[in-house]
Amino acid sequence: MAFRNYILVCGGTACESSKSEAIYAALVSECKAQGVADEVQVVKTGCFGFCEQGPIVKILPEDSFYVQVKPEDAKELVAEHIVKGREVKRLLYNKETNRKHAKAEDIKFYQKQYRIVLRNCGFIDPENIEEYIAREGYAALEKVLFEMKPDDVIAELKIAGLRGRGGAGFPTWMKWNFSKQVESDQKFIVCNADEGDPGAYMDRSTLEGDPHSVLEAMTIAGFTVGAQKGIIYIRAEYPLAIHRLEVAMKQSREMGLLGDNILGSGFSFDIEIRLGAGAFVCGEETALLASVEGRRGMPVPRPPFPAIKGLWGKPTVINNVETWANVPVIILKGGDWFSQIGTADSHGTKVFALTGKIRNSGLVEVPMGTTLREIIFDIGGGIANNRAFKAVQTGGPSGGVLTKEFLDTPIDFGSLTKLGSMMGSGGMIVMDEDDCIVDVAKFYTNFTVDESCGKCAPCRIGGRSLANILEKITSGKGEMSDLDTMEEIGSAMKKASLCALGQTSPNPILSTILHFHDEYVAHIIDKKCPAGKCKSLITYSINPEKCIGCTACARKCPVGAISGERRSTHSIDPAVCIKCGVCHETCKFGAVEIH
Amino acid sequence: MAKMTLEELRALRDSKKAEMLKRDINGKDTQVIVGMGTCGIAAGAKVVLDAFLKTLDEHRIGNVSVTQTGCMGLCYVEPTVEVIAPGMPAVIYGKVDAGVARQIVEDHIMNGKLVSDHVFDHPSTDILKDGGK
């Protein structure tokens, strides 16, 4: 027998710490006491992500959203809502709507995520074109081919104010318009799916979850600028995304949505996939085009921009996956609709891959103008393991770190750049107090040194010098003048590098020197790593007052650096210790200390 | 399928839209949708998919379709599964393994009972539910 009501009690860590367990137990016993136990199921759920107002209780099918519920409210909830069918108004979350009913859907919090790009992700079967079609799929293409002129499409994108989601934020309509205006026997449409920032997987997930949205958008662009050929440049490390794209392209061709004479309109367009070998610089558009042509992936100076002179010297519209995925919805719902979402100069939404020391890591899509605090604490549920927030890294190796004083900054194209970071393609890595900021800067710098193509000297030589200085600082040999040297090299690289890779790669260093000057000083002057990450600057020792002589650490030590009899205090030989930290993780009594 | 005309595309969309609303495919009124992006697969979504098929088979349940989808965005609780059954609220389950999959079939699908501790919420409202208007 099915139940008539489901009472969902949030069992997330935050709600649990405010007695959701007791609320759950009280609701179960009230249901029994009031004779409705057979009709109602009480369920403990995962975090609702609205921890600010916890503990949360949601009753289905009415979808009533109760906040800050206490165990003593259980009796009233069951008696009123379940038995008499009347919502308990004093507990409803209705401050924002001023309405009697507070449905979960009406609450602004749930509007914090707004899914345009990810509209179909996690909803349709990506390998079944019919499900995409059922969700208004190819309706935008239909509209473009039969009701609109190329100029109408560009006008709609202009009204929408869509800007490139790969990081640079160039207005999409302008790119399309440049290519459209050039007279040429051949033009190309390219999708940049060379997503390479550490911790970023927005584009991969979009292609895996909704490949047709990109195919449809590229076809629309082909019609608009007068191109018959599209190319998707995707890295070979994304086998599932490639597979889903191939399946999608095959189905589209069979149905006549790609290929000759699409839907009998007389317009022909087809797409092929080019695999990249995973070079980070190939995400730069001129390097990407060189790679497609079979040349070594190195950037060339712009102008001329690819929109005028791109692939094989022909006009080429090149957009990032996320930008493409926005296009069909804009055509369908109109530029006006899109321009209402977001901030004054950044319209629409942005997808972020939220990772690092965050409780709810995942893929989130929010309107532009959402604050870092809302993303990290409301949607992401805050920092894992009850540690303190230290910083958030945005924009990958091209971006910088932002500290807690900037948490209330609304995110858009301009705001983060002003603070020394950037929105970038959407990677967002959250760090807690256990992360060493110098170590983080070193990680990103080594990444860009490895990925530099070597063509221009500022990036090739400057990057290496920066990495050497960071190595020196983290091994305890740093001098205060190193900070000035790094700033000098960094600003030279910003001005003189050929492409965005070199121009932005000093950002992680420059922003951390700015926001975490003290931590650099600790490494340089005190020769200490406050977070305990930099191996040369830390020593492990055993606190005799806490050690009970259980031998657990000695048995785990890979180099036999720990000595001591059973039930007597152990000690670590610093000459033998390789600072792997296994003893620290193993000790249940907190006796192994890091200095 | 052969190449379509505009009219055929529109007709197909209308008929499929009705199906998506009911989510019933070939007389099946219950849908189990497994999130199978790279994140889901890495967390064991394939094992979960197999467990659903096996358990449904064992109980000789014929009204359930099991399909795959992309990443639902709840990467911290992968593998994730959405279950849409008649008379029940649409629910996303997280941290599903073979055992939980069996429990979902036996409790949720067969007995209309949610599986406690694994229920999660939809990340946002659907912008296309009003027909893309």
Image: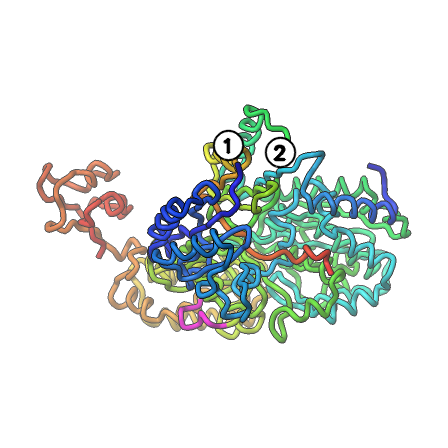
Residue A385 rendering spot, x and y as whole percentages: 34, 53
Q: Give the structural element (helix, strand or loop) at label 2.
A: strand
- The kind of residue tagged 1 is Glu
Residue highlighted by disc 2? B64
Residue A439 image-quadrant placement: bottom left
- Looking at the image, which residue is at 57% across and 67% down? A497
Same subunit under labels 2 and 1?
yes
Quarter of the image containing the N terminus of chain B?
top right
Viewer-side residue, B76 vs B57? B57
Residue A225 image-quadrant placement: bottom right
- Label 2 vs label 1: CA separation? 12 Å
Q: Mark 2 falls within which chain? A: B
Question: As displayed, is residue A313 above or below residue A40?
Answer: below
What segment carries the magenta color? A402-409
For the residue carrying disc 1, how many other residues have a C-alpha within 10 Å: few (<14), some (14-19), or many (20+)?
A: some
- The kind of residue tagged 2 is Val
Q: Give the structural element (helix, strand or loop) at label 1.
A: helix
Viewer-side residue, A409 vs A544? A409
Residue highlighted by disc 1? B106
